[in-house]
Image (cartoon, rainbow, N blue to C red):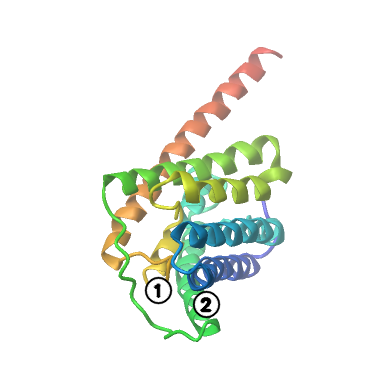
């Protein structure tokens, strides 16, 4: 549990989430510009930047706020009783609000119109399942690693998201705040605003299932430990 005051924790979530969104959108713009229309190459560029930045952000902000940077992760810790409800609500509001700022920053850096709406359709049962699976995997990565190898969390998360870009048809958004923000860019990384709600519902469902499953694992381990005493 962090010993930092709530305003500092919220500032860490704000800086971290804004930087994450700026990285996703900015690297998407750069990758699309330099790839010459090669979608696989553009996706690779987007993947490398996002995975690397996640490692850095968790190393920086993890000791301060826990580096949730994601309402689905905050939900998981709230359900586990490790984040108080009022703190969780504040985290989520900040994550969503500053995500929008991250998009504006990326657009400004690349001399694009600041305010845009995506035209990239991302819908269908396959993509919704992909988002549920990706968010389940992300939360599972965090909960499983933080229990046994907490020092490995930044690297595990960065690696999982890097893999998720390639094994899911949705390219593993796995983050409601990032999903909302990406509706406001016409770049390679965008999502049609009308497609956002289904993605967010799928993400929250994936996070919920992962929390339940890993809560069950932890309870089973505790019972076995008690029996061994």
Q: Quadrant of residue 219?
A: top right
Q: Where does residue 62 sit, x and y in percent of width and height?
A: 67, 56
Q: Residue at x 45, y 35 (%)?
A: 212
Q: Quadrant of residue 39?
A: bottom left
Locate residue 59, reporting x and y percent: 71, 57
- Looking at the image, residue 129 sits to the left or right of residue 39; the answer is left
Which residue was labeled with disc 1? 185
Q: Which residue is rendered at x = 51% and y = 51% of the image?
A: 73
The local crowd at label 2, few if under 14, some if 14 to 19, many if 20 or more residues have their Cα within 10 Å, is many
Q: Nearer the viewer, residue 134 or 171?
A: 171
Please name the residue shown 26% across and 50% down the image. 124
Question: Residue 41: horizontal and vertical position, in percent?
Answer: 51, 59
Residue 69 point in image, percent of width and height: 55, 60
Please say if the residues under marks 1 and 2 sit with CB atoms less than 8 Å apart: yes
Q: Which secondary structure, mark 1?
A: loop
Residue at horizontal 62 percent and vertical 17 percent from the top: 224
- Is residue 80 visible in this depiction of the protein? no
The disc placed on residue 106 is 2
| Inter-mark Cα distance, 1 to 2 | 9 Å
Q: Is residue 222 visible?
A: yes
Lower sequence index among marks 1 and 2: 2
Question: 203 left or right of 153?
Answer: left
Residue 135's tag is none
């Amino acid at each position: 549990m962090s010993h930092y005051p709530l305003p500092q924790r919220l500032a860490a979530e704000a800086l971290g989430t804004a930087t994450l969104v700026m990285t996703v959108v900015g690297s998407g713009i750069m990758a699309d510009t330099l790839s010459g229309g090669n979608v696989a190459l553009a996706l690779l560029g987007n993947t490398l930047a996002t995975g690397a930045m996640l490692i850095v952000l968790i190393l920086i902000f993890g000791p301060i706020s826990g580096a949730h940077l994601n309402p689905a992760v905050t939900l998981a810790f709230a359900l586990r009783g490790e984040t108080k409800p009022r703190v969780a609500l504040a985290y989520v509001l900040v994550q969503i609000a500053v995500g929008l700022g991250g998009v504006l920053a990326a657009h400004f850096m690349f001399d694009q119109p600041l305010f845009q709406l995506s035209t990239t359709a991302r819908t269908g049962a396959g993509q919704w399942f992909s988002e549920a699976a990706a968010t389940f995997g992300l939360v599972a990565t965090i909960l499983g690693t933080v229990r046994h190898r907490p020092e490995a969390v930044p690297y595990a998360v960065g690696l999982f998201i890097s893999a998720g870009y390639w094994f899911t048809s949705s390219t593993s958004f796995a983050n409601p705040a990032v999903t909302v923000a990406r509706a406001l860019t016409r770049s390679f990384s965008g999502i049609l605003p009308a497609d956002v709600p289904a993605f967010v519902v799928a993400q929250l469902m994936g996070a919920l299932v992962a929390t339940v499953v890993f809560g069950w694992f932890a309870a089973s381990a505790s019972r076995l430990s008690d029996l061994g005493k």
